[in-house]
Image (cartoon, rainbow, N blue to C red):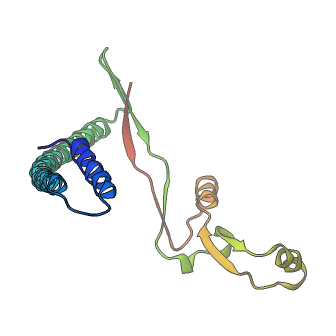
Amino acid sequence: MSNLWNLRQEYVELGDALVETRGEVTPEIQALMDKADTNTIATVFSLQDVREQLKDYAEICKKRADEFYDKATRYLAAEKKLKQIQIDALAISGRKSIANGAHKMTLQPTPLKIEVVSREEIPNRYLNVSLTVTMDEYQKIKELGITPIKAKTEENKKLLAEDYKRDNIEVSGVEYTTDVTIRVT
């Protein structure tokens, strides 16, 4: 493969020679043109070979990455199953915690998870609305109740969780879940 910088230099020299002869193709210029053309063809095809090799290497890497991703997924799934066996074994034994000198394992509840199953059933008290309005509209909204340019409604999961934890209030349209995990120290 010819050097790309040399190829560029050949075209610069060819251009300079054509300027000197005011575009006339002399035998020397024809020789420069033939040399540059031959080197261009060689370079282009050589680069194509390198590109194809790089594509092949990339494909090999992708396949290996997929293999490693699949292995990692299987390892994590196995780890999750083993963790569940530990949790089940401790729960069945009635123990909350065990230790052996190297590890201490303690059952602890996971944080409360709020999942909205039907927004329409949730009372307005548990919904937040974000408005996009101009400053003029904002000033008038207190007085006149102007319709906003854009309104976005979101559930107030923090309030839903607070009411559930404090007063055990379950709101329709919401599922409350918590689980047990094992903490290793």
Vertical relation: 101 (above or below) 22: above
Q: In terms of image quadrants, where is residue 109?
A: top left
Q: Residue at x 88, y 75 (%)?
A: 139
Q: Residue at x 50, y 52 (%)?
A: 112
Vertical relation: 159 (above or below) 43: below
Residue 49, x across and y down, in percent = 8, 51
Looking at the picture, tell me which residue is in the foreground, 17 or 76.
17
Q: Residue at x 27, y 48 (%)?
A: 13
Q: In terms of image quadrants, where is residue 102?
A: top left
Residue 183, x across and y down, in percent = 38, 33
Vertical relation: 11 (above or below) 3: below
Q: Residue at x 54, y 76 (%)?
A: 119
- Quarter of the picture holding the N terminus: top left
Looking at the picture, tell me which residue is in the foreground, 152 or 68.
68
Tally the numbered discs: 0
Looking at the picture, tell me which residue is in the foreground, 38 or 44.
38
Looking at the picture, tell me which residue is in the foreground, 19 or 6.
19
State the residue lying farthest toward the right: 143
Residue 67, x across and y down, in percent = 13, 47
- Quarter of the picture holding the C terminus: top left
- Is residue 153 rendered to the left or right of residue 176? right
